[in-house]
Amino acid sequence: MKKILLILAIILFVSSYSQAQGSRSVPTAESQLVILKTYPNPATTYITFDFQKGFEKGYLIQVYNFLGKKMYESQDLTEKTTLNLSDYSRGVYIYHLLDHNGKVINSGKFQVSK
């Protein structure tokens, strides 16, 4: 029963994530203010989140593994924030940058290859 619930949760996460990706609108001037670069990609020991424009204190970053489990969350961001990947397994991870109201203003993915 637990395996069935896990499989259903994964399917729900993937379908809702793909729907969110498919419903993106044309970028507005407001959404282009924040540009976040991640490097190196693929990463082995660390990943750096580098704000190019529009950095404000109070942003929140969340990192999820491919199954949707939250692996990292931080509100103590600087213009260059580095995340240690020593506890991360090989795979693809998704990040979301949220504003003060909890709205996702940037998202992307990176790969960990060990």
Image: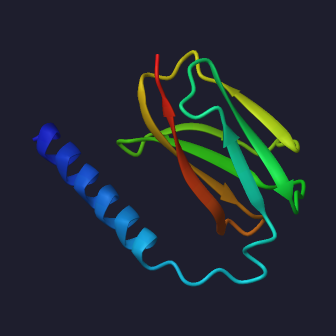
Question: In the figure, 37 relative to 101: above or below?
Answer: above
Question: In the figure, 28 relative to 79: above or below?
Answer: below
What colour-coding does the image apply? rainbow
What residue appears at the point 35 percent right and 42 percent down from the top-left corner? 67
**Would you identify the image quadrant in which residue 6 lies?**
top left
What residue appears at the point 61 percent right and 18 percent down from the top-left corner? 45
Of the 4 image quadrants, the one containing the N terminus is: top left
The x and y percentages for residue 84 are 66, 22
In the picture, measured across the screen, residue 8 lies left or right of residue 33, that is: left
In the picture, measured across the screen, residue 74 lies left or right of residue 88, that is: right
In the picture, measured across the screen, residue 73 lies left or right of residue 89, that is: right
Of residues 60 and 93, the one nearer the viewer is 93
The x and y percentages for residue 13 are 33, 57
Of residues 63 and 30, the one nearer the viewer is 30
Of residues 6 and 51, the one nearer the viewer is 51
The x and y percentages for residue 11 are 23, 56
**Would you identify the image quadrant in which residue 107 lies?**
bottom right
**Would you identify the image quadrant in which residue 2 lies?**
top left
What residue appears at the point 90 percent right and 54 percent down from the top-left corner? 57
Total numbered labels: 0
What residue appears at the point 82 percent right and 43 percent down from the top-left corner? 77
The x and y percentages for residue 5 are 18, 47
